Image (cartoon, rainbow, N blue to C red):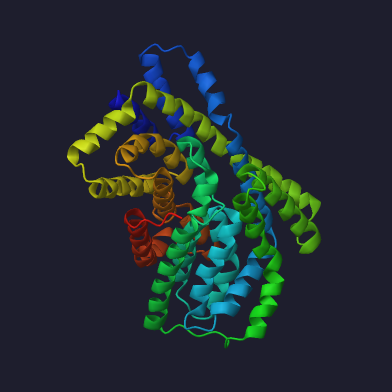
Amino acid sequence: MAWMLFGALFVFLLIGVPIALSIGLASLVVLVTHRVPLVLVAQRLFAGTDSFPLVAVPFFILAGDLLAKGKVSKRLVDFADSVVGFLRGGLSLVAVLGSMFFSAISGSGAATTAAMAAPLIPEMREKGYDSAFSAALIASAGTIGVVIPPSVPMVLYAVIADQSVAQLFLNGFIPGILMGLALMVVAMFTARRDNYPQGSPFSLPNVWRHFRRSFWGLLTPLIILGGIFSGYFTPSEAAVIAVDYAVIAALFIYRDCKLKDIFKLIVDSAVTMSLVMFVIASASIFGWVLANWKIPAMIADSLLSLSRNKYVLMLLINVIILIAGVFMETASALIILTPVFLPIVSSLGINLVHFGIVLVIGLAIGMVTPPVAINLYVASSVSGLSIERISRAMVPLLLALIAVLLVVTYVPLLL
């Protein structure tokens, strides 16, 4: 049965069927073959999306789009520049630090990449930075967008694995910071090797001036996460409050959006969310087929027969996650892999919140590994460089991110 399900899925993907349809059609092949009443399809499509925590997803997407549209990203870049821009290759560090700041607002890798690429790539090119490395660095830093909370993939994992969104958010900070530090190390080494220029001298008054200008943007994650962790509101309520705050900031504080712009952003976010929800609905049927024929248990038994050592098995799981990220979009891969791996990690006694962080980081790395590499496509579009050229410059950055994945996998960092 597993061969039929995954074989059909692979065939549909191979011939170019969209991922959401591939998931649903592969499930349908199994259901029709075994003469299961097709009314089940409609029931599972509805049940898969009938979840209160999923309310957070469209609102976090919309809040990120609202803040990315205006001047928040530029102000965050200026603040980061005032902090680390004086170092050699300072703009490289600004790219990473700015991405970390914006990650705490957007919850999206693509949005973080776009927000940083637009102001920084032209400036880095003008200052003599290698264009391919600049684009690769910003795309790599964009992966932090789904690790530092709020994170849309973490919300999806929490729903599927029945875990606390707040706990996942709380434990996403340290791995996200580690990813940023690892990329900064590579950036500093490259800056010294290629003799990139230093920026303006460090000045506390300059830092304070840019902090004040970016204050309302920096306040966003404090409102969202402070409210969640203090217990004043749930993650779903926090997402709605984030949208309210983003609208107020865009219309009345920064005044960089008009009502017609906000309407267009709402429509665009609704389109994005409809695609995500369609994947979730299709994956609900896929998950029912997996559970009904006990396929996750079969896969778990197969892996456990190779080794009972949890360190070896986690290494194998990481390899599978990284390969999946190469060929599948993050949300789709997460929805498919989570029910498959949960029985395995549970039998190994691994904390499911810890595994959720590992899964999200592993799939985030897929955002910069072609052919399905959304951050690379965004960076390529802004920079005008080919995917192939950016990918060659990506290698040391990719190795740094994989090193962080292994550290998070094997070193207990849970709070």
| Residue in the foreground of this view, choosing between 59 and 325 | 59
| Residue in the foreground of this view, choosing between 208 and 90 | 208
Instruction: Tell me, yes or no, if residue 46 can be seen here.
Output: yes
Instruction: Tell me, yes or no, if residue 255 can be seen here.
Output: no
Asked if residue 149 lies left or right of residue 324, the reply is right
Residue 342 image point, x, y percent: 37, 37
Asked if residue 204 lies left or right of residue 406, the reply is right
Q: Residue furthest left?
A: 306
Give me the residue at 38% from left, 77% from top: 189
Residue 284 against residue 53 in the figure, above or below: above
Residue 79 image point, x, y percent: 62, 74
**Total number of numbered labels?**
0
Residue 337 against residue 287 in the figure, above or below: below
Give me the residue at 44% from left, 49% from top: 360
Find residue 276 and report its image quarter. top right
Give me the residue at 78% from left, 50% from top: 260
| Residue in the foreground of this view, choosing between 249 and 158 | 158
Residue 74 against residue 351 in the figure, above or below: below
Residue 147 image point, x, y percent: 49, 55
Asked if residue 322 lies left or right of residue 90, the reply is left
Residue 373 image point, x, y percent: 44, 52
